[in-house]
Image (cartoon, rainbow, N blue to C red):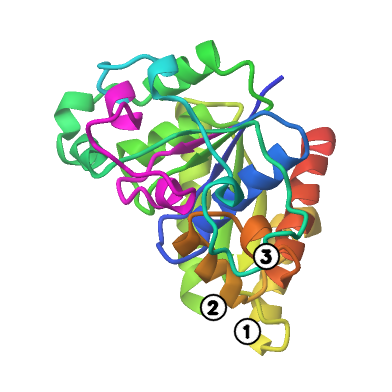
Amino acid sequence: MSRYIVFANRKGGCGKTTTAVNISYIFAAQNKKVLLIDLDPQAHATLSLNINPDPERPNIYHLLDKKASFKDVVQRVVPASQIISNLPNDPKQDRIKVDNLYIIPSSRNLSVVEISGPKFSGDELYLAEILHNNASEFDYVIIDPPPSVGILSVSALVAAKEAYIPMPMHFLAMEGLAEMTRLIYQINATWNPELKLYGIIPTFYNKNTRIAKEIASDIVKTFGAKSLAPPIRQNVALAEAPGHGTSIFEYAPDSIGAEDYESLANFIEAKGDNF
């Protein structure tokens, strides 16, 4: 069965898109067929995989606006190592080979969905309906919603079954965690009883700071130790990789960023068996 995963946080700058892109990539590298859905008008996931967010090309907006079919908007991701020659590592180095990563790209015209709320009102279930009827060939369907609470984020949560909240380890991020948790529970009660909070992902993590230790301890006390995912440490390569249109696994495969996302992928994979 397909696993429907959303990485969500209503606050920007939390590493949400970086997580969606890199987890999609590592699962695809493990011979899983993966569909990444860029549901953010900023189109950062699309750009991070070296795809032009062309508003004229069929994208997630056209799917939600019922002007394109599911097959029209899905496209295969071509690994950057096949098309970009200026990656910083030795081009002769063995890289992760990915042939089964697909994306439904975004574009800035998706912002119309949020602005024209009345036009799309009542369509919170539409994305879920489309995916559950058409995406069964994929092992993982991973959704990257915008950092806000609107119809796009709600649609992502209605379509997903597993919610993960990436959050930086600072005090104000705890407010965002509380709000996202309430929203997940609300979606569960209103539209999607299968939606559950599967994990909280510490991002920009520095184990030597007191605040990081205190917040991690608070998460364990509130949600239980099994909800605390392996942390993603601060790593400049993670910020640089999107500029090269690729994942951390192609840009800097020996970095701590690649190491951390591989650990996180193992955590998520195990959650599917044990939750």
Q: Is residue 187 above or below residue 146?
A: above
Task: Find the distance from the CA under tag 1 to the CA under tag 3.
Answer: 12 Å
- Which quadrant of the view contains residue 219? bottom right
Q: Which residue is mark 2?
A: 170
Helix, strand or loop at mark 1: helix
Q: Residue furthest top?
A: 133
Task: Find the distance from the CA under tag 3 to the CA under tag 2.
Answer: 12 Å
Q: Residues within 10 Å of mark 2 (few under 14, many from 20)?
A: some
Residue situated in front as seen by the camera: 135 or 30: 30
User: Could you tell me if the residues under marks 2 and 1 are in contact, i.e. CB atoms within 8 Å?
Assistant: yes
Residue 41 in the magenta stretch? The answer is: yes
Q: Is residue 62 above or below residue 92?
A: above
Residue at left offset 41%, top offset 55%: 10
Residue 211, label in figure: 1
Q: Which residue is mark 3?
A: 219
Among numbered discs 3 and 2, the one appearing first in the sequence: 2
Helix, strand or loop at mark 2: loop
Residue situated in front as seen by the camera: 254 or 143: 254
Read off the magenta span: 35-63
Among numbered discs 2 and 1, the one appearing first in the sequence: 2
